Image: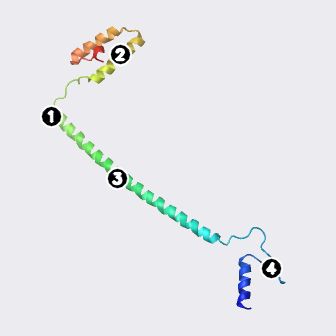
Amino acid sequence: MTNKTEAAIATLENLGYTHTGGMLWKPPLGQAPDFNMLDSLRARADSLEDQLIAQANRAVIAEQQVTALTQRLDMANRLNTDAREQLAQLSGRQAVPERMPMSNEAARKLVWSASTWSRSEGVSEDDVLEVIAAVEREQGIGATNDNL
């Protein structure tokens, strides 16, 4: 056989033709084979590899961020512990007042909630305000309905 004959036979076999004898080759049955499939699979594998590398890079960045946030949290916890220890030392040196005076904001909330409660319970608002005024005088604060 010559090189041309061998090349022709190889070409026909690669295209899916079969030889059962005689002068003619039988074409392949069904859909023509995709001889470029190997190239498309290589391209798909390269694409998936690129995606995998990008995802791995994102995972590394996320892990670094978690490490940084954990270090910040640890530092904040240490500072919080130090501050609590300093407050405990200071409170041991200073006398703690028997009662803390009420802030203006707290007094306003108390007046509002008391007046709302008095309407729902049928108690006169004047009676509630009189009790609140007595508490304010005792604590030395002056939140009333007039300055709310």
Q: Which residue is mark 2?
A: 114
The residue shown at (33%, 11%) is 128
Q: Which one is nearer the viewer's eye here, 137 or 18?
A: 18
Q: Which residue is mark 3?
A: 68
User: Which image quadrant is residue 89 in?
Assistant: top left
Extreme-front residue of the structure? 4
Instruction: Give whichever of discs 4 and 2 has the lower sequence position.
Output: 4
The residue shown at (26%, 45%) is 79
Q: Is label 1 or label 2 in front?
A: 2
Residues at marks 1 and 4, CA–CA distance in whole angstroms:
107 Å
Which of the colour schemes (rainbow, by chain, secondary structure, one colour) is used? rainbow
Instruction: Give whichever of discs 1 and 4 has the lower sequence position.
Output: 4
Q: Which residue is mark 4?
A: 25
**Callout 3: 10 Å neighbours few (<14), some, many (20+)?**
few
Label 3 sits on what residue type? Ala
Q: Which one is nearer the viewer's eye here, 43 or 66?
A: 43
Which image quarter is the C terminus in?
A: top left
